[in-house]
Amino acid sequence: MNNNITVLGIETSCDETSAAIYSSKSGLLSHALYSQIPLHAHAGGIIPENAARPQLEKIRGIVASAIETSGKEINDIDVIAVTNTPGLAGSLLVGLNFAKAMAWARQKKIIGVNHLEGHIFSSFIEHKDIPFPHLCLTASGGHTELYLVYDFGVFELIGQTLDDASGEAFDKIATRLELPYPGGQAIERLALTVDNHDFFSYPRPTAKTLDFSFSGLKTAVLYDMVKRNAYDLKTKKLLQKDNVFKAQVASSLQVCIGDTFVHKLTLALSLHRTVRAITFVGGVSCNRYLKQRIMALCAQHGKTFFAPSAQFCTDNGAMIAFVGHYRAQKQEFSPWSLDIFE
Ligand code: KG4
Ligand code: ZN
């Protein structure tokens, strides 16, 4: 394989269908994405059985669009990288089978990529100079994890959620507040209207461990709403529909999650003094308030802060192409027997 490797990355692990082209010489050349958010909005979330069918219909067009806008042709692609774990089985199968069929027909190598590794290195798509070792806080709808990142593909899990992910807390509380799906964005918008103030002081973690827990916070918010006669537990109905009250809940929740992230990262910095930077990735890292909190922490500790732009915080093919690229440089290809793992 020549020194200028061109990789097609494919991501279909959850409800997105995305493809991107990344090359050694020019970095990211294109990125195409089909989002199912409008399809799932009426159900208030993803129904796994309904996610794979539209992906099957869209994947060919999305891959074609990524290749076309990259200015490359199929013949220029050396490797196809595809998310094979973790995710929804049906959705993962759509991406993997498409990648295998294309690789077989066009005689390309394939590389199976772990979706979480994609998120961990997603800041590199736009920032080439992130120093190692660094801390990476991955916060999405399914994961909240802290990693110590030593090099490309070399990282260690040092903390993780014991129950719900932070994105799940945003989404579930948003549903209780009758806000549109996905909840994180709606909470951020509402919190801005009351200047991100902490109105209700929900409980913060005090334990000196790097693990997270968000299920207690979800319950604490619910019982606080019940206490204020804002929510009826029996009928599961929101009683206080006033936008100011909803904004106060949204804002208090956001400040509480911000405090939790800062608390855990401060502890991680004290335990791992050699880290030079912090990266904040995954769908929740779209949140500007949370980003500012971590940025301020970095400034305080003399560390550099990096986060992807919003289009690469949420699931995307570019992060899969990026990981596929450094794996291809190391000649770490997958066999044809590559399978999916939920
Ligand atoms: O990484 P992602 O697109 O998918 C998973 O791998 O889960 O993350 C989706 C999550 C959802 O829970 C969504 O509510 C959350 O990211 N999210 C946000 C914001 N935008 C998306 N959370 C807080 N603030 C946001 N602005
Ligand atoms: Zn994700």
Image (spheres, grey):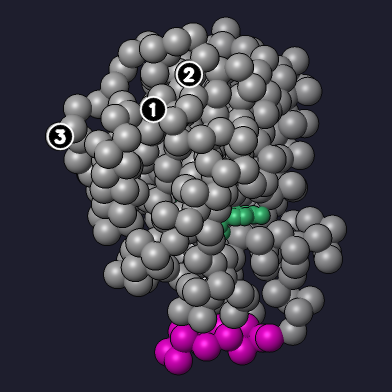
User: Helix, strand or loop at disc 2?
Assistant: loop
User: Helix, strand or loop at disc 3?
Assistant: loop
Q: Which mark is residue 337?
A: 3
Q: How far apart, in angstroms, are the residues tagged by discs 1 and 2?
A: 8 Å
Q: Which mark is residue 5?
A: 2
Residue 169 in picture, x, y percent from top left: 51, 59
Residue drawn at x 61%, y 24% is: 27
Q: Which residues are magenta?
A: 230-241
The residue that disc 1 covers is 79
Give, as a three-letter code, the residue at label 2.
Answer: Ile
The answer to which of 302 and 143 lies nearer the viewer is 143
| Crowd tier of the residue under label 3, counting other residues whose Cα lies within 10 Å: few below 14, some 14–19, many 20 or above | few
Residue 231 belongs to the span the image colors magenta: yes
The quadrant of the rendering that contains the N terminus is top left
Give, as a three-letter code, the residue at label 3.
Answer: Ser
Give, as a three-letter code, the residue at label 1.
Answer: Val
